[in-house]
Image (spheres, grey):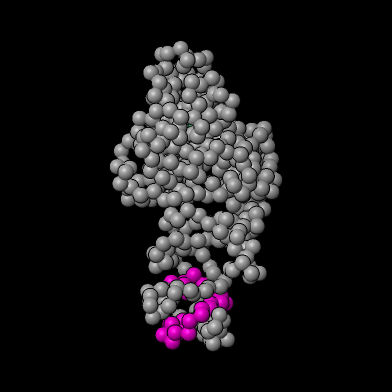
């Protein structure tokens, strides 16, 4: 929109949310999440295969049918009709006859209307298929009519579900066993968020990138305080030959990375300008508040019972606590007893992994931004750092352990370029936190 247009302010908002130009789908939220724009960056023909949605309006603006027919041909129009809700409108500035014929053959009622921006005519259409197209299996929403849900667990996962579902108009209640939100794994004092780079931009890299960019956008929207910018040391990929993406990730030499980190780093690094570190509980609380979900604390759920209307959630005495057509289990490892019946196989496949973080109250090196790679270091804002973390599969010991602390200090010393934990500055009283990660097969 041009400066003089009535849309200038909306255009500014859009420009402000425009993501780094990484390929794939980006969800941009406006008006406190009431308006979402799903932006696909890449080849439209590939992206169309991935979309699962029902559109009420389609606008074709793929340049010009004569110049780039691949954005107007039968295959592309059929793909669009697959996404159109019955009654959906379609429009385009073009009046290309083969395109209009193809739309009509796909079940659109096609007409010409007065054009705009100097064009005498444009095409308008309405999707009125004789038969409602069969959607491929798995493309229907899980619980299409559900307008209310109960979420078990008020950690990061439960809070994120509450926010996402409330933005879809679903009324959410979150039940939490502990006296406050985010006191289990999400109660760690600090955590990193950032994308991943790999040479072939595989599924893992794309998934982590989408998650990192969504986290960045959500933190900004909810004004959650966080440390911005993150360095991840790279020891395997030939970083000098890999292209970064401005605003998302940049490849830095060891010298450049060291200058940012304030210490001599041993390796080149990926710099994620929008990544960083947060206090996970602050993030979870912000998402819960923004969701407007009802929060029931100190309410452990002991069992689930399926009933014709959905699910009942019961306490240890078998009394009804909540009932809803849709239940989301976001209870981390504490919910494993709930995963009985058909889900028992899933519970068997999950691995619990203990992790210990270490707190160094007076750190010889306190990086101005989080640094990761063979461990990580996050400044605590008061002259100390959090560093970690250990990983022990199937270990349920909740106590802090000296041996694990020594491992963490070793990681810290290696990142900082210090001689090792034996030196006086790093021999500290036992301090830190233990929590558990949940690993699914293929993690
Ligand atoms: C040492 C360590 C370091 C980590 N570092 C990072 C990091 O840097 N970056 C990162 O992204 N991730 C990190 N993680 C992982 C991250 O902490 C977890 O993925 C995340 O906190 C999981 O959130 P959650 O909501 O699934 O689980 P939780 O935070 O554990 O929340 C589950 C909630 O459900 C409640 N609950 C369980 N059962 C019931 C029940 N039956 N009834 C009612 N309530 C119930 C629990 O009380 C709990 O509050 C780290 C993990 C560890 C252990």
Instruction: Give left or right: position of 156 versus 98.
Output: right
Q: Quadrant of residue 50?
A: bottom left
Please give the name of the residue rendered at 53% of the width and 73% of the height, measured from the top-left corner: 58
Instruction: Give left or right: position of 266 versus 101.
Output: left
Q: Position of residue 357 (x, y in %)?
A: 49, 26
Q: State yes or no: residue 81 in magenta.
A: yes
Q: In the image shown, does 6 or 28 lie closer to the viewer?
A: 6
Above or below residue 367? Residue 195 is below
Q: Residue extending furthest top?
A: 424
Above or below residue 149? Residue 266 is above
Quarter containing the C terminus: top left
Above or below residue 304? Residue 415 is above
Q: Position of residue 270 (x, y in %)?
A: 40, 41
Q: Quadrant of residue 175?
A: top right
Please give the name of the residue rendered at 43% of the width and 28% of the height, measured from the top-left corner: 263
Q: Which residues are magenta?
A: 78-104
Q: State yes or no: residue 219 in magenta.
A: no
Q: Quadrant of residue 41?
A: bottom left
Instruction: Give left or right: position of 50 versus 128.
Output: left
Residue 202 makes an appearance in the image: no
Please give the name of the residue rendered at 33% of the width and 42% of the height, measured from the top-left corner: 239
Please give the name of the residue rendered at 54% of the width and 32% of the height, measured from the top-left corner: 190
Q: In the image shown, does 322 or 68 lie closer to the viewer?
A: 68
Q: Position of residue 334 (x, y in %)?
A: 55, 35
């Amino acid at each position: 929109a041009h400066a003089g247009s009535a849309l200038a302010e909306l255009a500014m908002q859009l420009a402000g949310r425009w993501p780094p130009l990484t390929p794939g789908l980006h969800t941009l939220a406006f008006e406190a999440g009431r308006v979402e724009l799903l932006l696909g960056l890449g080849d439209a023909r590939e992206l169309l295969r991935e979309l699962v949605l029902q559109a009420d309006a389609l606008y074709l603006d793929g340049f010009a049918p004569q110049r780039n027919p691949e954005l107007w041909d039968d295959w592309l129009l059929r793909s669009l009709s697959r996404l159109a809700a019955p009654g959906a409108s379609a429009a385009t500035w073009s009046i290309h006859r083969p395109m209009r014929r193809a739309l009509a053959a796909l079940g659109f009622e096609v007409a010409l209307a007065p054009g705009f921006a100097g064009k005498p005519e444009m095409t308008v259409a309405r999707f009125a298929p004789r038969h409602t197209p069969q959607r491929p299996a798995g493309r229907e929403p899980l619980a299409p009519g559900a307008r209310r849900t109960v979420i078990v667990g008020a950690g990061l996962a439960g809070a994120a579900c509450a926010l996402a579902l409330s933005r879809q108009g679903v009324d959410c209640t979150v039940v939490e066993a502990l006296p406050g939100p985010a006191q289990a794994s999400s109660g760690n004092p600090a955590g990193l968020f950032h994308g991943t780079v790999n040479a072939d931009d595989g599924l893992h890299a794309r998934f982590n990138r989408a998650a990192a960019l969504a986290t960045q956008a959500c933190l900004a929207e909810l004004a959650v305080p966080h440390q911005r910018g993150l360095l991840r040391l790279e020891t395997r990929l030939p970083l000098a030959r890999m292209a970064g993406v401005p605003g998302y990730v940049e490849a830095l030499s060891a010298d450049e990375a060291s200058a940012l980190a304030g210490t001599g780093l041993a390796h080149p690094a990926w710099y994620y300008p929008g990544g960083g570190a947060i206090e996970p509980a602050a993030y979870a609380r912000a998402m819960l508040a923004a969701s407007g979900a009802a929060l029931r604390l100190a309410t452990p759920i002991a069992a689930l019972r399926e009933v014709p209307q959905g699910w009942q959630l019961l306490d240890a005495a078998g009394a009804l606590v909540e009932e809803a057509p849709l239940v989301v289990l976001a209870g981390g490892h504490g919910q494993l007893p709930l995963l009985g019946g058909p889900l028992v196989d899933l519970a068997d496949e999950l691995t619990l992994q203990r992790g210990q973080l270490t707190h160094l109250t007076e750190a010889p090196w306190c990086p101005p931004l989080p640094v990761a790679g063979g461990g990580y270091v996050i400044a605590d804002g008061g002259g100390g750092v959090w560093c970690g973390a250990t990983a022990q599969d199937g270990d349920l010991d909740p106590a802090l352990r000296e041996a694990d602390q020594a491992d963490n200090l070793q990681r810290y010393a290696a990142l900082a370029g210090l001689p090792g934990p034996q030196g006086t500055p790093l021999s500290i009283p036992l301090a830190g936190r233990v929590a558990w990660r949940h690993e699914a097969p293929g993690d």
